[in-house]
Image: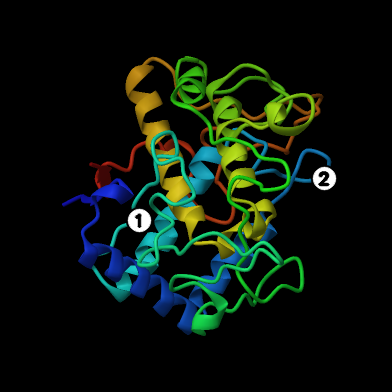
Amino acid sequence: MAYVRKDVRKLTAGERRRFVNALLELKRRGEYDEFVRTHIDFYTVDGEKGLRSAHMAPSFLPWHRRFLLELERALRRVDSSVAVPYWDWTRDRKATALPWTRDLLGGNGRRSDQQVMTGPFAYAEGHWTIKVNITDGRFLTRDLGRSAAPIQLPTKSELKWALDDPVYDTWPWDSTVRKGFRNKLEGWGTGFGSASWHNHNRVHRWVGGAMLNGASVNDPVFWLHHAFLDLQWSRWQRAHRDHRYRPAEPPGISDKQHERVVARHEKLPPWDETPDALEDLSRIYRYA
């Protein structure tokens, strides 16, 4: 029977506690840091050589769907009642709202060094030392809203702009495409500053701190954010039933994206599953 992923605002106090405790247990065992390492390893961008499976590519959504499921399976081995909640950032938009409470993810970082001082993931609590990173930082950092150059979280209309596009993705299948649901949701735009960051990318920048680089998994909000994105993919699928993941076939040898993107029936590293197999996981979980 499929389990349920809830809006974070709908979690009971007990559900919040069990979710946090399961995350802390994965961290204690060293399993959580492996998720951070995987995300760093697969953070391949347009300018680099080789296959892009996790970002700036059509497989952004199935890759993170599978990644999220891996984390959830690990959590449920600790506590079978746990499922990853989602954070609707079009609704809960303040630094004092959920999920930034003491009993869940804790609050903002302090002004001097962005160190998170409250909640179960604060360094001072002794349970969340950063061990896998691309910097030397040992504590979780946040800069909610970007104090030096404030930005706002994406709005409902900005999210709708992505959901209304019936085409999943278009050539050249990277961060430069201006049409297609995938990049409108992933959020690579043109220009500079907040105008160039849409939806997914803007949220990472609004949270700031640890969420700004390939080690963004170090902030547990990563999972709540990507659960909400996964929900949007499900909504897009229901709204555009005649449209599917693209490209259906691998780009040809003369295409600059040859062997750089994952086609619908190709295996999605580091797993053996294809985007096609990941389009519908309703047998495993559903959203409330």
Given the image, on which type of amino acid does mark 1 rest?
Answer: Val
| Image vertical order of residue 207 relative to residue 138, above or below | above
Residue that label 1 marks? 84
- Provide residue 225's location: percent of width, then percent of height: 47, 47
Given the image, on which type of amino acid does mark 2 rest?
Answer: Lys
Residue that label 2 marks? 49
Q: Nearer the viewer, residue 179 or 277?
A: 179
Q: Nearer the viewer, residue 269 or 133?
A: 133
| Quadrant of the rendered image containing residue 176 | top right
Instruction: Decide if residue 199 is on the left or right side of residue 177.
Output: left
- Per the model, the C-alpha gap separating discs 2 and 1 is 33 Å
- Provide residue 99's location: percent of width, then percent of height: 40, 54
Instruction: Decide if residue 158 is on the left or right side of residue 175.
Output: left
User: Tag 2, which secondary structure?
Assistant: loop
Observer able to see residue 247: no
Q: Nearer the viewer, residue 36 or 156?
A: 156
Instruction: Decide if residue 254 is on the left or right side of residue 227.
Output: right
| Quadrant of the rendered image containing residue 120 | bottom left
Q: Residues within 10 Å of mark 2 (few under 14, many from 20)?
A: few
Instruction: Count the marks.
Output: 2
Observer able to see residue 163: yes
- Provide residue 131's location: percent of width, then percent of height: 64, 77
